[in-house]
Structure formats: structure tokens, C-alpha cells
């Protein structure tokens, strides 16, 4: 017999009552309401006084590397005597409530920043904060002209997820709190500004840009980029922004974007955000992509010249439903954003490129999951292999592993297979429709799943095991792709002395190359690696996924001829997903450690703070202070 969800939920609610008395809101009548959702990573709470709209008016000073101005909010007081915003490293100059100056307090510095508390009353309508960003604002990366593609102008971009928006805007920075926004941004007149909002397609004469986001969004989706940016259209509703030397290549690479958008709508309902554009950022962008609404931020490392890495665009587009429309209530529910998005991404890939390509990506994803599960298990972090996390007291970034993505995907794929695709699709369509512009907790999702899918379809699933248990449950499906078996057979023939002629690489696609490189035998010799590089010029590969997989093997097997290419890659690319395994592999030997530190010393100024934070820890890096003078 399967454990019914009501037992599961009952068990949980007992837990909440016994240890979370203070979480419950007592209404004026004294009756106890639903427990409020507690976000351990924000000082704000959706059930206290909250903001519903933001008017941002800021100036970007590219020389002083600071941004300053005001954030004016529409306030819903909810009977509270104070309103609380999140800040981190901001200088707060003054605060007004309904146009009158008031005294504010900035709380103690904590792991999640400082609370900005402002007295209000029951009729308060508006709150204005005048502020300036600090020198270490973690969301912001200020690039010198040298660090851009075109080398002529400086560049700025923000990265808000998970809790960095509070380093550039005083804001209620919880994924459970949504607001609409308007912004006026002043930049030097030779630059253009774009945001996660309605965007310009050309420069203005005075460098002043106006933006509107009419749909309510959580703070982590606030985003801004400033640079010498130009625009190229793709379809009616889609286009790309990038520096001049990149924009045409990007438009070619992402030519299928309009079709992806149509495929996504055909699957899970109308796109609710107006336009969908992508901005290709300079290579220091720390992620592959970031789903800022209406304007995905993307790394240039997905421009491979053959459209082979565009699944990333499908992924960020899919977040327009899973994540941006229905949003994880707290970072403990991160799998609701990413697991659903990997599933949806795979469905878009299947619709555009066919089901074989979808399976290739599933197999590669499962390999990554297996590696992550092993690593977390070895490090004694088995609880971080649960779908539902407990990140209270930790930087949420620490919980953002492949688990949410790939175990989340495996969970949904298992549900699809048990319920049947037709039923599952109808369920997902209903889920997005029903909860649009709302946040979702893991418990609320499980209750909805039980009610709307499992019970009516008479499907039995051990939800507790999947969501609050470690590892990968036994009823997970095992994805396969025959083209990878073929590659393994050819690799065997090559290793047995067949020469590189045994490798029919002319017919391999990017994913077969990745599979091949990930599966080189543990005892491969440096002569063998030299043979591969000579035949296929892997160190010069223009495909960042292939190059990164190749370089990882070169480091693992101490193949020094590839080290100049490694140095170049690590210095130019700031995408954390590539940096961590490469530096991690270097750190496994004494010689590698020396090389890692030498490269990092040079490259560190090119990386965004989120990559720096992870790498400083990996390399046990202490900021090099200039020698004390006598
Ligand atoms: N939302 C994430 C990026 C992110 C996650 C930023 C957590 C900050 C904290 C984005 O949608 C994402 O998942 N990007 C992936 C690409 C994807 C194809 C798996 C990436 O950046 O590699
Ligand atoms: Zn994602």
C-alpha cells in the first residue's frame, strides 16, 4: 500500500505546529490562520506590510562603479506598524513615507544582509528610499572595455538570483513576494540600458531609458544590463541583444527562438509576458543563462556556430512558465523552479529537434546527476540530495546543485510515465494556469498533484521517498540513447589499437563528443590524448561544452600540451559550471594546485562575485594583500 498524501501532510503539519508556534499568525479575532510561509532568506514577509509596485529611478555611474537614486513603492500595510525591506551593502541616505521624511533603522549585518525597517500606519500608501550601491555590490559586475567582446566601452550587468537583488535595490527580496515595476535609468549617452521589462531597441540621445514590467514578479527577477548593445530581430515576438561583434552570430544561432516560443505555448499555454528576447553578455557571466522575464541573460559560450547548444534557450524560455509564472515560495522549494524547467526544456527540445536529441540530453543530465549524488554522498551531504531542502542559516547558493534540476526532472519523467503523457500534460497546463503569478510551496504542489493527477489517474507514488529522501528512488526511469553505445564501441576499437580511423567522428554530434570525452578510460595515457588532439584539434574547439570536457580530461591526466588552452579558457570564461570542475580537477594534485593558483590570481578579476565566492572556497584563496610598507 502506498502512503497516502494526507498522512504525509498530516505528519508535516504536526511538525509545523509543534516547532513553529511563532510562525502562525493570530488574526484579530484570535482564530489561528494558515501558517504563513516563512522565507529564511528574507527579512520581509508576505503576510506583514508588503510592497506591490516599484518605481525605480536610478543613475548608473560607470566610472565610479556605483548606481544611485530612489526606489518608491506602493505599500499594502496589512495592519503592521513597520515595513521591512532587505538590503545588503547599500548606503541608505533617506526615507520618506507618503512624501514625509521618517527615521529608518538599518539592522545588524547578517548572512542575508541588513533589514531596513520603516515605521508606517494603516493608511500608508507610499514609501521612498534614496540610496546608493556599495563598492562590493554582489549582484553587479562592472567590466572594463578590455573585458568585453568589442573592447571599446565598459559594461555592467546584474545577477539577482538567489538573494543578490538586495545589493542593488532596497527591496522585499523573497520569491514569495511579487511586484510590478517601472524604472527610469540614466546611463552615459554612448551606452544603452535593458532590463527584465519592456525594452528599447535603439539608443536614446540622452542616455535616459524607461521601462515597465506590468506583470508582478519576485525581486530575484529584477535585472539590468548596460553597455554598447545592439538589437537584431528574430521573429515577431523574439530577438537578441548583444555587443556589435556578437549580435549577428547570436541571431543566427538562436534563429529557432520564435518556433521554440510557439512550441512552448502549444505545450503549456499562452506566453504571458509579451516579448521574449535574449541578451548575450560578455563571457564573464557566471551562469549559462538567467531567466529574467522578457529578457533572458545568456553566456556567449552557447554560441557554438552550429546551434547545438540552444537547449539552454529552451530552458530559460521554459522558466517563463515554471519559475516566473509559478514561483518557488522559498529557496527550499528551488526544485519546483528547476526540475519543472528541465522537464519543460526537454519537451521543447523534443518538439523542435526530435525525440532523439531530447534523449541525448536526458542521458547526459543523468550522468551529471550520478556524479553529483556520489560527490554529495562522499562529502556527507546526503540531505542535500533531497528535492525539498532545508537551507535556513546557509547561503541558498549552496543548495543550488544538479539535484533540483536532474532529480527534479527524473521525478516528473516518472510521473509522466505512470500517468501517461496526455494526462500529465493536461495536469501541467492546469497547474500553470491555476497558479499563474503565485508562489508555490513543495507541500502545496504535492497536495495539488495528489488531488489533480495521482488520485484521478489511480497512480501510486512514494512521494515522501522522492521529495524528502536521499538519492534516486528505484522507480526512476533510465534514459538511453543508442548513438552513445555506438561511440563506446568505437572507443573500444580505438583503444584496442584500431587507430583514430576506428572513431567515425565525422558522423558524431556535439553530444556524442561530450559522451566520448566524459567516458575516456581512467588510465588513458598522455600519448592517447595527444593522438586525439592531433586528429581533432580539440584544444581549439569552438564548442565550449566539448572544449571544457576535453580540458577536464587533460587536467585529470596531466596532459600539459593542453595547458595554454586551459589557461586561455579559464581566463576568458566566467561560467561557474565550467570553472568549478576544471579548478576542482587541478586542486587534486600538488602541481595542479600551483597552476590553479597562478591562473586564478590573473583570472579572478574577470569573474562575477558568485563565481568568486565558490572558487575562493575551492582554492582556499585568501585575498592577496599588497605587502605592508615599512
Ligand atoms: N535560474 C538558473 C540560474 C541560477 C540558478 C542562478 C541558481 C542563480 C542561482 C538558470 O535558469 C539555469 O538553470 N541556468 C543553467 C542552464 C540550464 C540549461 C541548466 C546554467 O546557468 O547553466
Ligand atoms: Zn533554470
Image (cartoon, rainbow, N blue to C red):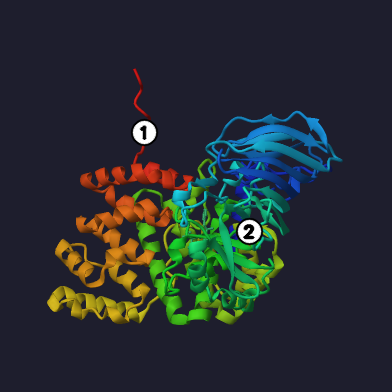
Query: Tag 2's secondary structure?
Result: strand
Q: Name which residue lies at 54% across and 46% down.
A: 140
Tally of numbered tags:
2
Answer with mark 2 or mark 1, whichever residue precedes in sequence.
2
Q: Residue at x 28, y 50 (%)?
A: 586
Q: Which mark is residue 615?
A: none
Residue on which disc 2 sits: 327
Q: Is residue 272 above or below residue 441?
A: below
Left or right: residue 490 compared with residue 271: left
Q: In which quadrant of the rendered image does the C terminus lie?
A: top left
Kindly tell me whether residue 78 is visible in this rendering.
yes
* Mark 2 Cα-neighbour bin, 10 Å: few <14, some 14–19, many ≥20: many
Find disc 1 in the rendering and name its residue.
Answer: 624
Q: Nearer the viewer, residue 344 or 147?
A: 147
Task: Name the side, left or right, on which 419 lies relative to 150.
Answer: right
Q: Position of residue 93 (x, y in %)?
A: 69, 31
Q: Looking at the picture, how far across and down is residue 404, in whole percent? A: 49, 59
Q: Residue at x 16, y 61 (%)?
A: 526
Amino acid at each position: 500500500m502506498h502512503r497516502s498524501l494526507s498522512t504525509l501532510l498530516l505528519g508535516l503539519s504536526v511538525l509545523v505546529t509543534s516547532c513553529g508556534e511563532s510562525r502562525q499568525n493570530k488574526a484579530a479575532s484570535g482564530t489561528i490562520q494558515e501558517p504563513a510561509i516563512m522565507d529564511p532568506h528574507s527579512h520581509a514577509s508576505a503576510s506583514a506590510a508588503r510592497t506591490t509596485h516599484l518605481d525605480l529611478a536610478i543613475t548608473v555611474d560607470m566610472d565610479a562603479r556605483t548606481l544611485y537614486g530612489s526606489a518608491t513603492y506602493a505599500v499594502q500595510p496589512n495592519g503592521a506598524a513597520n515595513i521591512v525591506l532587505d538590503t545588503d551593502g547599500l548606503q541608505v541616505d533617506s526615507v520618506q513615507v507618503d512624501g514625509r521624511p521618517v527615521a529608518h533603522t538599518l539592522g545588524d549585518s547578517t548572512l542575508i544582509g541588513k533589514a531596513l525597517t520603516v515605521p508606517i500606519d494603516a493608511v500608508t500608501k507610499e514609501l521612498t528610499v534614496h540610496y546608493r550601491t556599495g563598492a562590493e555590490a554582489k549582484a553587479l559586475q562592472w567590466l572594463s572595455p578590455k573585458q568585453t567582446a568589442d573592447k571599446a566601452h565598459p559594461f555592467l550587468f546584474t545577477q539577482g538570483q538567489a538573494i543578490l537583488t538586495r545589493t542593488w535595490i532596497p527591496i522585499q527580496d523573497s520569491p514569495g513576494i511579487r511586484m510590478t515595476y517601472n524604472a527610469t535609468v540614466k546611463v552615459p549617452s554612448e551606452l544603452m540600458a535593458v532590463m527584465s521589462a519592456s525594452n528599447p531597441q535603439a539608443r536614446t540621445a540622452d542616455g535616459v531609458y524607461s521601462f515597465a514590467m506590468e506583470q508582478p514578479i519576485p525581486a530575484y527577477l529584477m535585472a539590468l544590463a548596460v553597455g554598447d548593445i545592439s538589437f537584431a530581430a528574430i521573429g515577431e515576438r523574439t530577438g537578441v541583444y548583444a555587443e556589435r561583434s556578437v549580435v549577428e552570430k547570436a541571431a543566427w544561432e538562436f534563429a529557432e527562438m520564435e518556433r521554440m516560443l510557439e512550441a512552448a505555448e502549444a505545450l503549456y499555454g499562452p506566453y504571458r509576458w509579451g516579448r521574449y528576447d535574449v541578451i548575450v553578455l560578455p563571457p564573464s557571466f557566471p551562469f549559462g543563462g538567467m531567466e529574467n522575464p522578457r529578457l533572458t541573460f545568456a553566456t556567449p559560450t552557447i554560441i557554438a556556430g552550429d546551434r547545438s547548444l540552444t537547449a539552454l534557450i529552451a530552458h530559460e524560455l521554459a522558466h517563463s512558465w515554471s519559475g516566473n509564472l509559478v514561483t518557488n515560495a522559498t529557496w527550499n522549494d528551488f526544485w519546483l523552479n528547476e526540475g519543472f524547467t528541465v522537464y519543460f526544456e526537454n519537451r521543447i527540445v523534443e518538439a523542435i529537434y526530435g525525440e532523439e536529441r531530447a534523449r541525448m540530453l536526458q542521458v547526459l543530465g543523468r550522468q551529471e546527476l550520478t556524479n553529483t549524488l556520489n560527490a554529495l554522498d562522499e562529502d556527507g551531504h546526503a540531505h542535500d540530495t533531497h528535492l525539498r531542502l532545508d537551507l535556513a542559516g546557509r547561503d541558498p547558493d549552496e543548495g543550488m546543485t544538479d539535484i533540483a534540476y536532474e532529480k527534479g526532472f527524473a521525478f516528473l519523467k516518472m510521473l509522466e510515465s505512470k500517468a501517461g503523457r496526455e494526462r500529465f500534460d493536461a495536469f501541467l497546463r492546469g497547474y500553470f494556469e491555476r497558479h499563474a503569478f503565485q508562489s508555490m510551496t513543495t507541500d502545496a504542489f504535492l497536495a495539488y498533484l495528489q488531488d489533480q493527477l495521482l488520485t484521478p489517474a489511480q497512480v501510486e507514488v512514494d512521494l515522501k521517498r522522492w521529495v524528502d529522501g536521499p538519492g534516486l528512488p528505484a522507480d526512476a526511469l533510465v534514459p538511453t540513447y543508442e548513438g552513445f553505445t555506438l561511440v563506446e564501441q568505437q572507443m573500444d576499437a580505438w583503444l584496442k589499437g584500431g587507430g583514430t580511423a576506428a572513431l567515425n567522428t565525422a558522423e558524431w554530434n556535439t553530444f556524442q563528443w561530450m559522451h566520448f570525452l566524459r567516458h575516456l578510460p581512467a588510465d588513458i595515457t598522455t600519448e592517447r590524448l595527444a593522438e586525439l588532439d592531433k586528429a581533432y584539434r580539440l584544444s581549439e574547439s569552438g564548442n565550449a561544452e566539448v572544449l571544457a570536457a576535453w580540458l577536464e580530461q587533460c587536467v585529470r591526466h596531466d596532459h600539459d600540451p593542453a595547458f595554454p588552452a586551459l589557461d586561455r579558457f579559464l581566463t576568458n570564461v566566467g561560467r561557474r559550471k565550467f570553472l568549478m570542475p576544471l579548478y576542482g580537477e587541478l586542486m587534486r594534485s600538488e602541481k595542479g594546485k600551483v597552476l590553479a593558483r597562478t591562473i586564478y590570481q590573473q583570472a579572478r578579476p574577470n569573474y562575477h562575485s558568485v563565481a568568486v565566492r565558490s572558487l575562493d572556497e575551492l582554492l582556499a584563496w585568501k585575498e592577496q594583500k599588497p605587502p605592508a610598507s615599512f
